[in-house]
Image (cartoon, grey):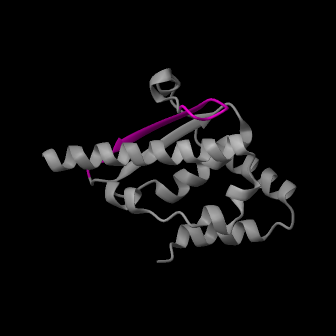
Amino acid sequence: MRDPIQEQIVADFELFDDWMDKYNYLIELGGSLPPLDPAFRTDRYAISGCQSRVWLAATLSDDGRVHFSADSDAIITKGIISLLIRVLDGRTPREIIDADLYFIDRTGLRENLSPTRANGLGAMLKQMRMYALAFQAQNEKQ
């Protein structure tokens, strides 16, 4: 199933001919990420498996949707997490768990990241899904 947000990301990446321009675009995206509350810049919210420091927090709104906030000390990593947030923020826990994030392959992102950044991408996605699983379990208990 096509996702309009992912389709827009793919289209945005297609505007650039080479990967240096795409990296610059990722840096721009990271710069547009809202500032993370300093209370979340702690080890509790740090994602292990990333070479750079990445903090990710999630909340569940009253309408059952997950909202993410994040930051990183590395500008390209910050751009990557901003893309993941763009796609997954505001969705239900089930939608996040089941999401097919095809934009990662269609943009060439996975194959053009260094192995350590690709591992970090996987760790960020895993943490987002772990939050969703926890919220899903919380909903089922109520």
Q: Nearer the viewer, residue 103 or 49?
A: 49
Residue 120, can we see it?
yes
> In this rendering, would 23 be left or right of 55?
right
For residue 8, above or below residue 56:
below
Residue visible at 38% across and 43% down in the picture:
131
Residue placed furthest toward the front: 115
Residue visible at 53% across and 73% down in the picture:
4
Residue placed furthest toward the bottom: 1
Whether residue 31 is in magenta: the answer is no
Residue visible at 73% across and 65% down in the picture:
13
Residue 68 percent across, percent down from the top left:
46, 44
> In this rendering, would 28 be left or right of 106?
right
Residue visible at 36% across and 41% down in the picture:
59
Residue 25 percent across, percent down from the top left:
76, 54
> In this rendering, would 28 be left or right of 5?
right
Residue placed furthest toward the left: 142
Residue 40 percent across, percent down from the top left:
48, 27
Q: Tell me which segment is drawn in magenta.
A: 48-62
